[in-house]
Amino acid sequence: MAVLQMQRISICALKKDRKAILEKVQSMGVMEINHVVEDDEAFGRMDTLNARQSFDKKAQLADQALAVLENYAPEKSSMLSSLEGKKLVEQEKFSKAAADKEKIIAAANRLVGCSKEIAENKANILKLENQIESLTPWLTLDVPMDHQGTENVAVLVGMMPGGLTLDGVYARIAEQNPDLEAVDVHIIASDKDAVYLTVLCLKAEEALVEEALRTAGFARPSQVTDKVPARLKTELEAEILKLNKRIEKKEAEIVGFADSREQLKLISDYFRIRSEKYEVLGTLPQSQRTFVMSGYATAEAVPAVQKTIGEKFDCVIDVEDLKEDEEAPTVLKNNSFSSSMEGIVASYGLPHKGEFDPTTIMSFFYVFFFGLMLSDAAYGAIMAIVCFVLLKKYPRMSEGMHKSIKMFMFCGFSTLFWGVLFGGYFGDVIPVFSEKFFGTAVNIKELWFVPLNDPMRLLIYSMLFGMIHLFIGLGIKGYMYLKDGKVLDFFCDVILWYVFLIGLILMLLPSDIFASIAQAEINFPPALNTLAKALAIIGAAGLLFMSGRANKNPALRIALGAYDLYNITGWLSDVLSYSRLLALGLATGVIASVINQMASMIGSGIIGVIAFIIVFIIGHTLNMAINLLGAYVHTNRLQFVEFFSKFYEGGGKPFEPFHSDTKYVDIKEETL
């Protein structure tokens, strides 16, 4: 439950060692580079743009080659392969790949080249197929499409609108030019869109015939050939066959590179690491013989940096605490349980300098509320078991994924706990199934009460849990005031609110309104009732006169106090928000019960059992998925809107150490 102390660490060393030191810092991954050296004539910066672009280009080339391999020789993987994480490789193996980088890059070039050749051949095949398709209507034509006819006879090859018959074509010609008689029309093919035909006429009348045909919709083919269509089709098909064989040859060549997949991954990460190193290298202030590297590191990591760098290189390492106005990046450190919820806090905003880390307290309430919302023992057991198995089976999954699955495992245990208290095991499936198929209802007794039978009781407890949650949030605000020495703010903004709220609660409990909700009467002694009123009045008066204490104008001060006092409606709204604990808890049980009733309505016997099982599996899978999502969303909301609003600002900058940010593998290096 802490934000780790950050320190600024500066390294001044010989320029000849800068790459080696940078590589060591990168491999350790504990320092965020952040320079504070002002521009000085004695210091310059190295231009690394060309080198970085070269490295990025080679890394992208390796990625493209891997994509080609995945397309033609896919790597076998399971449905849960995304959980496997990066493969851990020895430094020796990585160094060997780096030594063979030219050979591996040549293989990548060849793979990408083969892929381009395949793409070009496929494009050519598509063009040839389009040509064949355009030739299809003319396949019965036994002369070339550009045939000019004889010395005295002209041949017109073309198309006219669909639906025309031979008589219709003659009629159109006659309508346009009745004097044309020496015309012979042959329909080659026809479809709904066009009629394909050849027209024979005298050379002397060719222009008149074509003009008459054009008026009727005649058009020459967009593509003509000097070969007979059927013969040309045969030649095109032969060319397609050749291209397909070339494609098969290139595909076989690509598959032959399957054993190079791991080497390509290693070399891609190698150039990616070098690009990142040169990016930082370009920011280092350097003189003729020395360079300076400065940045942030956690106080617990500083000794390791001093030992690793200081003992191996001639350098000066300076460590200093942060200045008061210096906002350092934030690193959280929590126990195994709470660390799984750090992503929830980070999604809202990391604590800034000097702010309280709410992760541990929030994590308890998060799991508590999540289980109460889902509240089915069977659902919780499934969640916990599945998440536990995944954590054990895939130990190298990414850190973020590991934390998320671990969080849901704890939420599963909480759901199991609340389900046992409420007697929910897939809703009421046990009594429904036993009564339907065995004639006797078997019940598992709840350890506390059944929310479906007593919803108002759960509503009261939900609001009670909400008040505890909000009061703790207000208490954390008070702790932060005391930590900063703001005693007056602690009294005015925390103690007075506690006094006011406790007084109102004690006044509400014996009232008729609360009795109608709780279905029970609470009677306090007269002295306690008087104390409740006194607390409420003292708290209200204190807030009225002290909330605007920063303003010296009495009227404005009281106005600001009245406005702050009006914030009691916000507290009421926050408390009512916790009724979602009741709503989602009931929703899980009600939907589960409806599914069980639907499954039991189908029939009895073996068919009824099979139908029951099918409806049961489908229904409860959907119910669990929907309500799990609802529990996740609304539990987050209770933390972000109700809890954090009482004390937490966030806005801290995440710690981004300079490290080997690889894509495919993790390199086994020395660790702290």
Image (cartoon, rainbow, N blue to C red):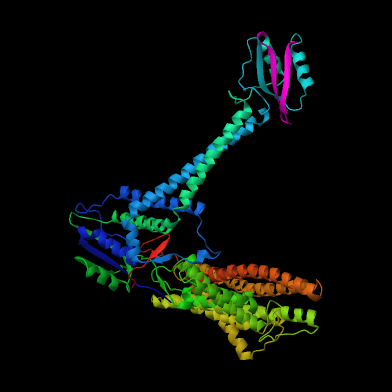
Decide whether residue 609 is among the magenta residues.
Answer: no
Q: Tell me if 83 is positioned left or right of 293 in this view.
A: right
Is residue 199 positioned above or below 320 on the image? Answer: above
Report whether 588 appears left or right of 640.
Answer: right
Q: Main secondary structure of the magenta part?
A: strand
- Looking at the image, is 540 positioned above or below residue 447? above
Q: Position of residue 314 (x, y in %)?
A: 19, 65
Q: Is residue 192 magenta?
A: yes
In the image, 12 versus 426, the foreground residue is 426
Horizontal and vertical percent position of residue 281: 29, 56
- For residue 147, what is the image quadrant? top right
| Residue 324 relative to residue 436: left or right | left
Q: Is residue 480 left or right of residue 22?
A: right
Residue range of the region highlighted in magenta in the rendering:
181-204
At a point 32% along the width and 63% down the height, the residue shown is 26
In x, y percent, where is residue 598?
Answer: 77, 71
